[in-house]
Amino acid sequence: MAQRRDDFVSAFPVCASQFNVYIPDKMHETLNLKTSLGDLTSDQTLLAKNINVKAAEGDVVLNGCQGEVLKGTVEFGNITLQQLDASVDLQTEEGNVTVSPVKSFIYSTALL
């Protein structure tokens, strides 16, 4: 018997997994966060000079980032950043980008 989840029908049971990773509260040189399928969320303020976020399918929700540069790429999903204190380079193939509030804001756009 097929199980239905939203618009997706599968002949196999869909199992939702959640992994909790705790990052020490200190300034890191680099944080690399990556997921292939699923959401990536953090309620902890991420402290790193360079923060790299990559998601193939899923939303990225970060509720606090402090550092020099945050780079994020999401193929299919949304990016939501709150309490941001870093310059950003964000890309999404299919989805929305929401950034609020920003501690300091330098605005620059480019079309690729």
Image (tube, rainbow, N blue to C red):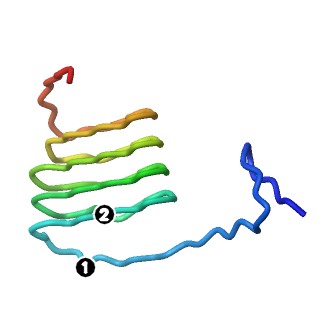
When the figure is inspected, residue 57 is found, relative to residue 49, above or below; the finding is: above
Total marks shown come to 2
Dot 1 falls on a residue whose secondary structure is: loop
When the figure is inspected, residue 21 is found, relative to residue 71, above or below; the finding is: below
- Quadrant of the snapshot with the C terminus: top left
Q: Quadrant of residue 29?
A: bottom left
Q: CA distance from mark 2 to mark 1?
A: 15 Å
**Which mark is in front, 2 or 1?**
2
The answer to whether 108 appears left or right of 36 in the picture is left
Q: Which residue is mark 2?
A: 33
Indicate the amino acid at tag 2.
Answer: Leu
Residue at (20, 58) in percent of width and height: 51
Residue at (59, 72) in percent of width and height: 17
Q: Which residue is mark 1?
A: 24
N-terminal of the pair, mark 2 or mark 1, is 1
Compare residues 47 and 111 and report the one nearer the observer. Answer: 111
Q: Residue furthest right?
A: 1
Q: Quadrant of residue 32?
A: bottom left
Residue at (15, 63) in percent of width and height: 48
Dot 2 falls on a residue whose secondary structure is: strand
